[in-house]
Amino acid sequence: MSDLKTILVINGPNLDMLGTRQPEVYGHDTLADVEALCRQTAEAQGIAVDFRQSDSEAEIMGWIKRARGAAAGILINPAGFTSTSIAILDALLIYDGPIIEVHISPLFRRDEFRHLSYVSKAATAKIEGFGIQGYAFALTRLAQLSRAA
């Protein structure tokens, strides 16, 4: 059994298509590249990651609820659920640790309907527009917060 604190990394719908889906918006990095970056960053920060992706709102909500008392923090890229899921917001509001919302592209430069984020209402912080490097920034901050707790 590991003594490392674990950060739950949640990737929402269609993020499994990174690298091929709209590379002009999301770049050419794949979800495997994101996972590798997260694992590398976590190792450097002395934490572990539980890396997941789902197109299912219910599955994501289940992961969030099970993280309560089990994960030292949550990094979430809600993707298409950002501006639609009050249910994910409600699950995040139940969680008792830090939450960082990450977006690969800058939402404020995209379609107006993407500007609203329900997840932001539960997030400790939000990082957007840094490509996949935003995941590394978020994990570094979550590691700091977990050490301070």
Image (cartoon, rainbow, N blue to C red):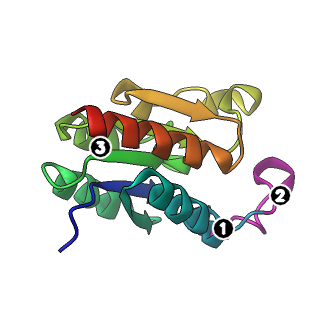
Give coordinates of residue 68: x percent, y percent.
Answer: 16, 49
For the residue labelled by badge 1, is the local secondary structure a helix, a strand or a loop? Answer: helix
- Give, as a single range, the part of the protein colored magenta: 14-28
Q: Nearer the viewer, residue 25 or 139?
A: 139
Q: Which residue is disc 1 drawn over?
A: 33
Amino acid under disc 2:
Pro
Which element carries disc 2, helix, strand or loop?
helix
Dot in front, 2 or 1: 1
The reply to whether residue 11 is in sight is: no
- Residue 140 higher or lower than 48, as above or below: above
The residue pinned by badge 3 equals 87
For marks 2 and 1 on the same chain, the one whose residue lies earlier in the sequence: 2
- Residues packed near mark 1 inside 10 Å, few (<14), some (14 to 19) or many (20 plus): some
Magenta segment includes 17: yes
Q: Is residue 18 magenta?
A: yes
Q: Is residue 32 above or below residue 59?
A: below
Quadrant for the C terminus in the image: top left
**Residue nearest the observer in this picture, 71 or 44:** 44
Q: Quadrant of residue 134?
A: top right
Which image quarter: residue 103?
top right
Q: Quadrant of residue 15?
A: bottom right
Q: Counting residues from the N terminus, which is met first, the one under dot 2 or under dot 3? A: 2
Residue 6 placement, left or right of 28: left
Mark 2 Cα-neighbour bin, 10 Å: few <14, some 14–19, many ≥20: few
Mark 2 sits on what residue?
A: 23
**Which residue is found at the position 55% from the left and 63% from the top?**
40
Of badges 1 and 3, nearer the viewer stands 1
